[in-house]
Every structure is written in structure tokens, then in C-alpha cells.
Image (cartoon, rainbow, N blue to C red):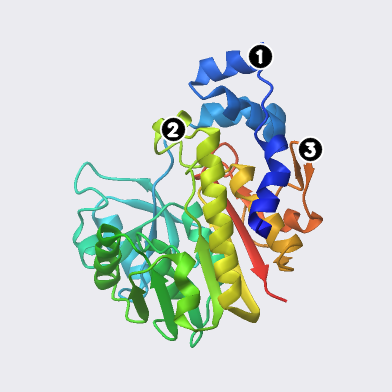
Amino acid sequence: MSEIDSYLKNHESLLYTYHITPEIKRIADKYGFLEYMVERYLEFLGDQTEDFLSSCSLPLTKSIRCNSLKVNCGELEKRLADRGFSLTKIWWSRFGYRVEKSPPRPSLGATVEYMKGFYYIQGEASMIPPEVLSPREGELVLDMASSPGGKTTHMAQLMNNRGTIVAVEKNPSRLRKIKSNISRLGVSNVVLLSMSGEEVSRLGMEFDRILLDAPCSGEGLIPLDPSRKTKTAPEDLKNFQRTQLTLLVSGFRVLRRGGFMVYSTCSIAPEEDEVIVDFAVKYLGMKVERIHGIPGERGLTSFKGISFSPELSGCIRTYPHLQYTEGFFICLLKKE
């Protein structure tokens, strides 16, 4: 049995056993969520659970990333203001803006500025992983799950188009979308490969930094997609876990010693977040680098009777009822 199989088996009975009380049934029925999801939320959100569930029915403020590869951000602010958009700078982000007000026409995705690649429409929390990884000019960077290209092109921007990003994606339709975004945004330092993240060892390369924005349930995107209130069964979480751990190990093998990896998901499920990072710390010997300067709640150090490494408090989580963004999990790991 592999380390991944053993790890998952050791946690399965605790993670996937649910105690559904009448109160849980009431809350689940009130907000339209699956009962097992509410049971889990009460475990790690406690008395904030109903605030969270309620916030999932409220719209999020749209946000954009100014693309400094093509335009001065002050100039973009002026041009969009002239079109009737009202922007406020996201204080922790180098290029992010909230769109506080939009005109009836044109829509955010139909302006001349958008078509020219002056900005990318991107969720605020989605901007965090590239900022935390902070790739530098001249480095060799791997994006292990690059579709649709928002984080890939964000990293290219942070690198000023210098150095190399190897972005992998196996799905042909997703590849076309990434190519389109790379072209529109004027990115020139990305090598796009048709392959899965599990296969990256075949490249025979060592990377300075790796972004693993892992495939997940998307449990943090409920404000954008209400179907996710009832979409994911426990068995689906198990399948995502196995994929996430496999990708993590694949990335670890091609990361140079002293190199950095960001593990992130658009999920607030501990099964896909802390459970995965705890494996990186305890089985792979990676070190969690504490994230500073970005708003978020601290990573969990226990869940459903499982104790995680205290280092996991250095990761961050975002929620719609606290940070007013999508739900996201972000952790910066170093290969010792």
C-alpha cells in the first residue's frame, strides 16, 4: 500500500462519519445545503455557521486585475472611470481592483480595454495564490493546473514576462482558453504543454517555484454557483483528495531544494485543504511558510478529531461572510 493509500485509510473513519442532529437538519433545510456539509461547517465555523450559509446567497463584488504588461494601471483607472465604472484598489494586491459600480453598458467583459487585454476579470481571492508564490524575474516556474490561465498570466505579470513558466493542461478545450488569454494579455514567457500535472516528472526539470491550484470540489464558490450547495457527495471529496495528494507528490519531486510551492483550492473543505497540507508536512518533510499581509483566517490545526501540524496555522482561508470574497485556501510550502 502506498503512503497516500495508507494516509487516506487512516483518516477515512473520522473524516467521513457524520452525526446528523435535528438542529443540523433544520439548518440544512433552511439554507438548502446537504446535511453532511452543515455538520462539517459547525465543526470548524461554530457559531459563525449561519452567517456563512446566509452570505452564500449574496452576490460578491466583481474584481479585475490590471494587466501592467499592456497598460499603466493609472491610465486604466481613468479609462474605465470615463466609461462609468467605479474602481477601488485592493490594498494587499499589486494589480487588483474591486469594481464597486458598473454602467448599464458595456459589460465588464465587453469593453475595448478588455478586448485589448488591459485587464483580466478575476475573483479577488483567486489573486492571492500568485501573490503569495511571488515568482521572480528569471526563475523557472511550474503551473500544475493552469486552466483557464488567470493565475498563469498573473504570474507572468509578476515576473515582467522574464523567466519561464511551464503551464500544463491536458483538456484540449481548456488549452484553447489558456492560449486565448495568454495571447490577449500579451504574455510571452509561458510554455504551454498538453499533459497532466501527474506527469511532470517526465519533463526532467527542477523548478524554483510551483503553483498547485488543485482541482477541487469548488466548495468556496457557492456564492457564484448555488448548485454547489448540493453537488458534492462525500465520495466526490474522497476522489478529489486522492487527485490532490497525487499532484502534491508529483510537484514535490520536481521542486528544487529550497524552492517554494503554493498549494491552493477554491474550497473551504478541510478534507481538500489542511488534510492535504498535513501530508506535505508529515510525510514529505515540507515546511509551512507563514503568510503575512493578506486578509484571511488562519488554517485549521484540528478537524473532526484529527490533529494537524501546528504549522498549518500559517496557511490562510477566506470566506464570503468575513473577507467578502470567494472561499479559498492558500498555503505556502518550502522544500527543505
Q: Give the class, few, some or many, for how many residues have Cα within 10 Å of label 1's Cα (few <14, many ≥20).
A: few
- Write down the residue under mark 2: 231
Q: Earlier in the sequence, mark 2 or mark 1?
A: 1
- Write down the residue under mark 1: 23
Whether residue 235 can be seen here = yes
Pair 3/1: label in front: 3
Q: Nearer the viewer, residue 70 or 199?
A: 199
Q: Nearer the viewer, residue 84 or 118?
A: 118
Task: Spot the residue most to the bottom.
Answer: 138
Task: Tell me if residue 204 comes above or below residue 116 in the rendering.
Answer: below
Give amino acid for label 3: Gly
Q: Secondary structure at mark 3?
A: loop
Q: Earlier in the sequence, mark 3 or mark 1?
A: 1
- Write down the residue under mark 3: 305
**Quadrant where the image shows the N terminus:** bottom right
Question: Which residue sits at x=81%, y=55%?
Answer: 310
Q: Secondary structure at mark 2?
A: loop
105 displayed left or right of 63? left
Question: Which residue sits at x=71%, y=30%?
Answer: 46
Task: Tell me if residue 192 comes above or below residue 121 in the rendering.
Answer: below
Label 2 vs label 1: CA separation? Answer: 22 Å
Task: Tell me if residue 61 comes above or below residue 22 in the rendering.
Answer: below
Instruction: Give the quadrant of residue 59.
Output: top left
Label 3 vs label 1: CA separation? Answer: 21 Å
Q: How many marks?
A: 3
Pointers 3 and 1 in contact (C-beta within 8 Å): no
